[in-house]
Amino acid sequence: MAPPPPLAANVTALPLTSTAPLTVVNERLPWRHTFISLKVRNFRIFAIGHFIAVTALWMQRIAQDWLVLQLSGSVTAVGITVALQFLPSLVLGPWAGMMADRFAKRKILMLCQSVAAVLAAILAALALSQRIGVWHVYGIALALGLVTVLDQPARQVFVNELVGPAYLRNAISVNSTTFQLGGLVGPALAGLLLTAVGAGWAFAANAVACCCTVAMLLTLRKDQLHLSAPVPKRKGMLKEGLDYALSKPTIYWPWLMAGFIAVFAMSLPVLLAAFADHVYDVGAAGYGLLNALVALGALAGAVMSARRRELRLRSVMLGAGMYGLMLCLAALAPSMVWFGAAMVLAGFWCLMFLTAANQLVQISSNLAIRGRVMSLYIMVLIGGQAIGGPMIGWLAEHVDPRTAILVSGGVPALAAAAVAVVLARRGQLLLRVDLKDRRRLVKIVRRAAVMP
């Protein structure tokens, strides 16, 4: 399967009423095609830049959270930092999606990365000069959140302009893989830097990485982009995106599940900081290690999601439910070894959920409205952490870290089970045990298939 030939400004504008069918791969791809979208030159350059940027961003986040914990001695303060960084997505998410539909995504990304480089440089200068306080971190976290709210929907939709519809599902999985690979390398490097030279150099590394991302965006060949016609400004654009999302089950069910995951289970770094400092007493290096273990499992999940043959709502609910279950098991871990193993499994199932939900929402939405649809999804997924960060941090500090992680996993697991029951009843689905089929002992089948 070869990459698409160079296109001369392939501009398309689809009516909002038309929606491409969900991509279903009927045959398992050969391993050499697991990341076939990387054959597209523009996407390959973008993926390299994305990996560098994500690695440095994880370094900054780990250093930032640990610095706040050391300056304040409060896990709740770490949760507040998370809340400030994600609060703009909760408030301004739909507006950012409208901007992504109206303006060139590449230019939006270049602007956002340039501002992020400046913010990281300021944070590095304050830390290296030892003049930094918690309020400095709060202010820059909020400013970075304002950048992220515009960057994220543009980045999501830009993937389609890089590879076109034929490779979109695979490109989303590759994006998740690079993100998790960066999440594997970044925390480990942050732990080493925090132990050896302090947080300032991690912030400086992120500033340099943002500049590298801008440079790589400049090298993309514009004549090979699958550009979509800008959507003209008009009244009711935000409501149009909301109505569209609510009208499609393949959008609003993942959206609902993302809300439960975001509020309760996406503030995992806050919990890991509590476990590293208060439960296992392993310091900054141990905190980096726990985050790296989560990313290791997520990396395996990203590879598996790239090879997923079918894209269905049940995949979203299974991933969410298993992620919550793994967090519940982590609460019962008798030692850090078992806790680390649970974190690997949690990372795997978290990524299986995130890629399935992301793919389903993107592929279910028309390109002309995808920016607004994705901004609503991101608003829930990222903005929910603005609510969950302080809440989970307060539970970990004032009740107990184990209780906090039990709540963090238990609520999404119960929500996924409830949604699965609703979907099963609507689709008249049943679980059937087939002892003759060793590969699939338990199957989900339609009720008519088992009735006499």
Image (spheres, rainbow, N blue to C red):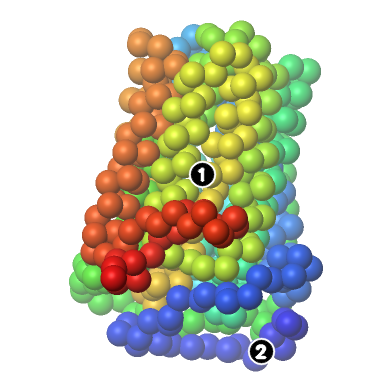
* Tag of residue 7: 2
Q: Residue at point 32% right, 34% down?
A: 411
* Residue 445 against residue 339 in the figure, above or below: below
Q: From the top left corner, tell me how far across and down residue 75 is, in percent.
A: 45, 16
Q: From the top left corner, tell me how far across and down residue 24 is, in percent.
A: 52, 75
Inter-mark Cα distance, 1 to 2: 36 Å
Q: Nearer the viewer, residue 357 or 206?
A: 357
* Tag of residue 350: 1
Q: Which one is earlier in the sequence, the residue at label 1 or at label 2?
A: 2
Q: Residue at point 55% right, 79% down?
A: 165
Image side of residue 411 versus residue 69, left or right:
left
For label 2, the SS is loop
Q: Residue at point 53% right, 44% down?
A: 349
Q: Residue at point 52% right, 54% down?
A: 435
Image side of residue 232 versus residue 360, left or right:
left
- Name the quarter where the C terminus is drawn: bottom left
Which residue type carries mark 1? Cys
- Quick one: label 1, few (<14), some, or many (20+) residues within 10 Å? many
* Residue 199 against residue 361 in the figure, above or below: above
- Quick one: label 2, few (<14), some, or many (20+) residues within 10 Å? few
Q: From the top left corner, tell me how far across and down residue 364 is, in percent.
A: 40, 72
Which residue type carries mark 2? Leu
